[in-house]
């Protein structure tokens, strides 16, 4: 495997400019294998390299794939308008790496959000041809009725869609239902509930493909690395 100098490794992982990374190394802030390294041009095999910066552990990754349990009140935008950007919930190194959300959740929608700096992964997961199922739990203003469930299953017409949109639905309790979508249209769950005569008071995405919030065990605002294979994506393709 090709080696890389330590300053280039730090820069690739989002620790700042080459000059700043060299200063970190010269200051003794970087340890590899528990030992301080103060020569910026010392070479290592980058992939999987374990190191610490100011005693914070990191693993070198060519690309990162993240899952975040998004709280309400954050925008999935790099230039937010009225609420903080969701990227502020992540270490600043990921902003340096140009990590971006895969798709969008409204500022008041919570739950599972994927992020990556792999453009091919973002494109693949955002493509409507992928048909990746996304599972939401919606809390409704009015009680869930058999008629509401039937409407959603049979299809409701939205004013800017050429054909009615259908969804797999399952009632969870008097005011909550599980909705499974593959299309990912703009505000789809909220608009479908409104078109069916109800109103969405709260919305949480609980799963994307084979990745579920329950399995990840993430508290609100917490994040973790994930393997892209969980979404049947091979970075080598």
Image (cartoon, rainbow, N blue to C red):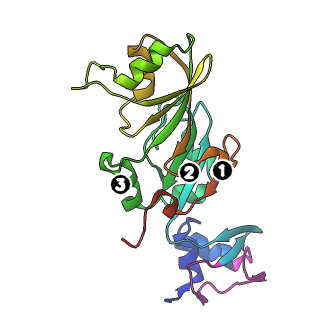
Task: Compare marks 3 and 1 and give the one earlier in the sequence.
Answer: 3
Task: Specify few, some or many for label 2: CA neighbours under 10 Å numbering under 14, 14-19, or 20 or more.
Answer: some
- Disc 1 + disc 2, Cβ < 8 Å: yes
Location of mark 2 (residue): 211
**Would you place residue 46 above or below residue 85 in this image?**
below
Toward which corner of the image does residue 59 lie, by quadrant? bottom right
Residue holding disc 1:
215
Task: Estimate the spatial distance between the alpha carbons at disc 2 and disc 3, rounded to whole Å.
Answer: 18 Å
**Mark 3 in CB contact with mark 1 (< 8 angstroms):** no
Q: How far apart are marks 1 and 2 (CA)?
A: 7 Å
User: Which one is closest to the eye, mark 2 or mark 3?
Assistant: 2
Q: What element carries label 1?
A: helix
Q: Which corner quadrant of the image does residue 175 belong to? A: top right
Residue shown at the point (61%, 89%) measured from the top left: 42
Q: Where is residue 20 in the image (x, y as percent from the top left)?
A: 59, 70
Residue 76 seen in this snapshot: no
Q: Compare residues 80 and 63 and report the one nearer the observer.
A: 63
Residue, x 34% and y 23% (percent of image)? 155
Q: In which quarter of the image is residue 232?
A: bottom left
Q: Does the magenta stretch include residue 47?
A: yes
Magenta stretch: includes residue 145: no
According to the image, label 3 marks what residue? 123
| As drawn, 168 above or below 9 | above
Task: Provide residue 161's location: percent of width, then percent of height.
Answer: 25, 25
**Magenta segment, which residues?**
26-49
* Residue 143, numbered label: none
Q: How many neighbours does mark 1 have within 10 angstroms: few (below 14), some (14-19), or many (20 or more)?
A: few
Toward the left, the furthest residue is: 162
Task: Choose between 66 and 215: the one closer to the eye.
Answer: 215
Can see residue 20? yes
Residue 77: x percent and y percent? Answer: 46, 41
Give the CA separation, mark 3 to mark 1: 25 Å
């Amino acid at each position: 495997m090709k080696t890389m100098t330590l300053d280039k490794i730090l820069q690739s992982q989002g620790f700042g400019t080459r000059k700043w990374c060299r200063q970190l190394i010269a200051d003794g802030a970087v340890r590899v294998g528990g030992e301080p390294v103060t020569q910026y041009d010392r070479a290592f095999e980058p992939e999987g390299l374990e190191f610490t910066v100011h005693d914070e552990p990191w693993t070198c990754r060519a690309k990162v794939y993240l899952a975040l349990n998004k709280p309400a009140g954050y925008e999935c935008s790099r230039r937010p308008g009225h609420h903080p950007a969701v990227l502020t919930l992540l270490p600043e190194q990921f902003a340096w790496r140009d990590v971006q959300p895969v798709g969008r959740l409204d500022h008041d929608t919570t739950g599972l959000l994927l992020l990556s700096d792999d453009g091919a992964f973002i494109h693949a997961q955002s493509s409507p041809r992928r048909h990746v199922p996304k599972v939401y739990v919606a809390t409704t203003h009015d009680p869930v009725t058999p008629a509401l469930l039937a409407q959603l299953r049979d299809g409701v017409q939205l004013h800017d869609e050429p054909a009615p949109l259908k969804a797999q639905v399952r009632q969870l309790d008097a005011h909550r239902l599980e909705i499974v979508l593959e299309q990912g249209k703009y505000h789809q769950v909220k608009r479908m509930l409104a078109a069916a005569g109800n109103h969405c008071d709260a919305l949480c995405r609980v799963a994307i493909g084979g990745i579920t919030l329950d399995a990840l065990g993430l508290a609100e605002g917490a994040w973790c690395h994930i393997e892209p294979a969980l979404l049947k994506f091979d970075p080598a393709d």
